[in-house]
Amino acid sequence: MIDDKKILFSGMQATGSLTLGNYLGALKNWVTLSDEYECFYSVVDLHSITVRQDPAELRKKARNLMTLYIAAGLDPVKNCIYYQSHVSGHAELAWILNCFTYMGELNRMTQFKDKSAKHADNINAGLFTYPVLMAADILLYQADVVPVGKDQLQHIEITRDIATRFNSIYGDVFTIPEPYLGKAGAKIMSLQDPTKKMSKSDENPNASIYLTDDRDTIIRKFKRAVTDSLGCIKYNEEQPGISNLIDIYRACTGMTVEEIEKEFDGKGYGDFKLAVGECVADMLTPVQTRFDELSKDKAYIDGIIKENAEKAGYYANKTLRKVQKKVGFPERVR
Ligand code: TRP
């Protein structure tokens, strides 16, 4: 607890270009959650180097993501938004937790299996211990809740296991975190293959709406979205493409499925796709405008980066010092 509020931690990698899926599935909800919780939102750059990155590109993308957090509506005074690499406690706690994590546990992680298949020429130890760093992120802030997508649930599970193990040896050191899965409908699928999640690393640019896409591009991509030949706008398993468009429309408008089905009853796919495209463009335009304004204000962003790194560092150190003492490291001499 900080000031009577439960603590929330989440993070995003700055690699790839953020998509509508990241926005509706994560960022937009983060903004809502920031009233209820004391929130830490990190740009997790330590995680990014588990696959090879171009240094200049990584730095630029991390800065853009930080700016986007604010442009999307996260108040940087109320929320602690910071770079993971600016708080050394993440790496320090990760090392300690590595010594409380079994090879067998890490071997079972499906993301590790997927990523090592994809980067067969660079299966490094960091990729293997990625979940331990993630556990350190979460436990360092004594987070109660962690909003994540379904694909990260296994990592939350291992975080809980590591924390429980540590607590059973040393007493109540860590809060055991709970995953927070957003409301149904927040999972946005590819526009070209609606059985696949919309991904920032998709090779087909028509499959994803990027947060930087302009209005015409957005509308064009929706026009090309894969649907079916049934010709009716109904939410069901046989029409994954249309159902995905309904999900997007409802996430943008706040309407229910029934209301949407009624609004488009008897209308063609062309009309519906245009309506979805327009409401997505309407939603993203103010974020893009704000992003452009903020990007020009270097001093303002720099100030936020500095202040929030200090704030995060303060809370991180509290946990880290406690952990270091528990495992038997000598006290610091002042
Ligand atoms: N692994 C997460 C992802 O790829 C990002 C992440 C890193 C994270 N550390 C975290 C998410 C801690 C939640 C909490 O999506």
Image (spheres, rainbow, N blue to C red):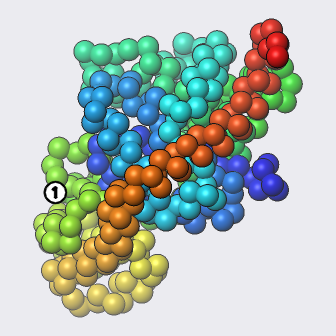
The residue drawn where x is 47% and y is 59% is: 70
Instruction: Report if residue 85 is visible in the image.
Output: yes
Image side of residue 85 versus residue 289, left or right: right
Residue 262 spot, x, y in % from top left: 36, 89
Residue 328 placement: quadrant: top right
Is residue 220 positioned above or below 301 on the image? below
- What is the quadrant of the C terminus in the image? top right
The residue drawn where x is 57% and y is 66% is: 32
Image side of residue 274 versus residue 74, left or right: left
Residue 261 spot, x, y in % from top left: 35, 84
Secondary element at tag 1:
helix
- Of residues 302 and 234, the one drawn nearer to the viewer in this rendering: 302
Image side of residue 240 versus residue 226, left or right: right
Residue 13 placement: quadrant: top left
Instruction: Report if residue 189 is visible in the image.
Output: no
The residue drawn where x is 62% and y is 20% is: 92
Residue 212 spot, x, y in % from top left: 26, 59
Residue that label 1 marks: 206
Q: Mark 1 near ligand 1 (CB under 8 Å)?
A: no
Is residue 121 positioned above or below 58 on the image? above
The residue drawn where x is 30% and y is 28% is: 55
What amino acid type is highlighted by mark number 1?
Asn
